Image (spheres, rainbow, N blue to C red):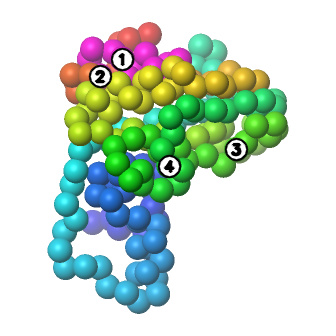
Amino acid sequence: LEMNTRLQVEHPVTECVTGLDLVAWQIRIAEGERLPADQPAFSGHAIEVRLYAEDPAYGWRPQAGVLHRLDVPGVDAEFTVPARHGLRLDSGVCDGMPIGTHYDPMLAKLIAWAPTRAEAARRLAAALANARIHGLATNRDLLVRVLRHPEFQAGDTDTGFLERHD
């Protein structure tokens, strides 16, 4: 049995489908508060992608340079659960920021939440396709292709997906 006392990078998916703020709960528990006895209700579907400053076409090499622009239209919330089905952006970078290769090249996490998985995938693909990202190569186009791929849309994916679909 393994117990992990830290939040995983995918925690926004859980937050979106439960409406719980896991970071706030983690702090409450550290202060001695108990978890509620009732299990949270789940609503809808959420899909998260990680936008990286790396180039999938060249062996996933991290990119260095200035991030001139990162703008994702239609974002409903940042670092918190959207009030209704929508888009959440979690990012620690801003326009004009230098991006180096000595740290993780993740620029942002984008999470789509919708009543159905298909709608969440469509919303996420559209948001990424319409995002304005300038200054660095990213994995954005790959993410859009994956989200729009029939095998992904059918939920028929596994760890060999990228090897099968170049």
Question: Which disc, if any, is residue 148?
Answer: 1
Residue 160 seen in the current view: no
The three-letter amino acid code for the residue at tag 2 is Phe
Name which of mark 3 and mark 1 comes first in the sequence: 3
Q: Residue at x 47, y 67 (%)?
A: 23
Label 4 vs label 3, nearer the camera: 4
Mark 2 surroundings: few (<14), some (14-19) or many (≥20) residues within 10 A:
some
Is mark 3 in CB contact (under 8 Å) with mark 1? no
User: Which contiguous range is marked in magenta?
Assistant: 141-152
Label 2 SS: helix
Q: CA distance from mark 4 to mark 2?
A: 25 Å
- Image coordinates of residue 63 in percent, x first then y, are 72, 27
- Return the residue found at the far top: 166
Is mark 3 in CB contact (under 8 Å) with mark 2? no
On the rendered image, what quadrant is the C terminus found in?
top left
Nearer-the-camera pick, 91 or 63: 91
Residue under circle 3?
93
Is mark 2 in CB contact (under 8 Å) with mark 1? yes
Note whether 29 is above or below 127 in the view shown. below
Note whether 99 is above or below 145 in the view shown. below
Q: CA distance from mark 1 to mark 4?
A: 23 Å
162 left or right, relative to 89: left
- Image coordinates of residue 12 in percent, x first then y, are 42, 52
Residue under circle 2?
152
Label 1 SS: helix
Q: Residue at x 44, y 23 (%)?
A: 126
Q: CA distance from mark 3 to mark 2?
A: 29 Å
